[in-house]
Image (spheres, rainbow, N blue to C red):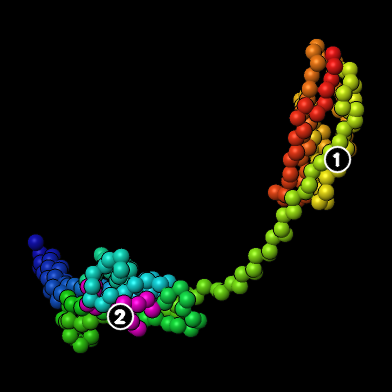
């Protein structure tokens, strides 16, 4: 190996050694910057979680939800349930002592069903948060911090609909039903003409002639067939003067048909 090759090998080894030294210096800085970026991401994600929790809580409150301070989620503390459920699984831990509704009337709902337009309610959510990287803590004033968010909403107001009074129903006037027929006796087949003589302004007449035949109208006819034996038929008339205003009269053995 001549002197030229020795110089080239020494130069190559020197460059590799310099690269390793530079990497050893830069790598901690890069890792620190990466951790700082991740820490900032945690802060922003936690803030979004708290903001959404406050919005969810105030939405429930505006719709008549119930709230009891410093108490766990229950059927009588639905605002707290909404906040804690929304914040669950995030980078922050929200407990019932960090959820505040304003106003908070004792034992009452801020937004009842008869709330007036313009009535507002707010929900504030706070949670402790701890940073990992020291230099990010310097930016925020310390490793331990409190993240918070407040959401406002107007109470949901149902429109007041004036209902029209129910119309007074027309009193039902039952008709007085009567009718006549001629001839009422004869040898079959023969036709009997029936005439309604009812009072009370009838609007419909329904006849049943006793032999299985029916008809409608104020004046009708029915032909009775030739029977094998002497027969007697009941005749029924139903007269209607309107809805549910009907009267029925039956004349037993009214028509006699001879064989």
Label 2: which secondary element: loop
Residue 53 in the figure: left or right of residue 26: right
- Judging by the rendered image, the residue that carries numbered circle 1 is 196
Name the residue: 81% across, 16% down. 230
Residue 243: image location, x then y, percent: 72, 50
Give the magenta-colored segment's residue range: 94-110
| Label 1 SS | strand
Quick one: 112 or 140, which is closer to the camera? 112
- 228 is higher (above) or lower (below) than 43: above
Q: CA distance from mark 2 to mark 1?
A: 75 Å
In the rendering, at what x and y percent does residue 232 appear?
78, 22
Q: Please indicate whether residue 254 sits to the left or right of residue 73 in the image.
A: right
Mark toward the start of the polypeptide (2 vs 1): 2
Side (left or right) of 57 relative to 129 = right
| Picture coordinates of residue 179, whole percent (x, y) | 84, 38
Residue 106: give its label: 2
Foreground label between 2 and 1: 1
Q: Quadrant of residue 122?
A: bottom left
In the image, what residue occupies the spot 10% across and 64% down? 2
């Amino acid at each position: 190996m001549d002197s030229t090759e020795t110089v080239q090998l020494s130069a190559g080894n020197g460059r590799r050694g310099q690269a390793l030294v530079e990497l050893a210096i830069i790598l901690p800085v890069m890792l620190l910057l990466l951790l700082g970026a991740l820490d900032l991401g945690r802060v922003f994600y936690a803030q979004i979680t708290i903001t959404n929790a406050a919005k969810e809580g105030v939405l429930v409150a505006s719709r008549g939800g119930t709230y009891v301070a410093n108490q766990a989620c229950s059927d009588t503390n639905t605002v707290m349930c909404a906040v804690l459920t929304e914040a669950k699984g995030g980078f922050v831990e929200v407990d019932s002592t960090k959820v505040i509704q304003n106003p908070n009337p004792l034992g009452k709902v801020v937004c009842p069903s008869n709330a007036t337009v313009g009535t507002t309610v707010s929900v504030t959510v706070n949670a402790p948060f701890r940073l990992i990287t020291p230099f990010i803590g310097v930016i925020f004033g310390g490793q331990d911090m409190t993240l918070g968010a407040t959401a406002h909403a107007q109470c949901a107001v149902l429109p007041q609909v004036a209902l029209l009074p129910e119309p007074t129903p027309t009193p039902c006037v039952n008709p007085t039903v009567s009718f006549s027929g001629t001839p009422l006796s004869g040898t079959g087949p023969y036709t009997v003409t029936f005439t309604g003589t009812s009072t009370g302004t009838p609007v419909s007449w329904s006849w049943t002639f006793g032999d299985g035949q029916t008809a409608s109208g104020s004046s009708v006819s029915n032909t009775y067939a030739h029977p094998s034996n002497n027969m007697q038929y009941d005749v029924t008339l139903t007269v209607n003067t309107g809805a549910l205003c009907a009267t029925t009269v039956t004349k037993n053995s009214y028509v006699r048909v001879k064989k």
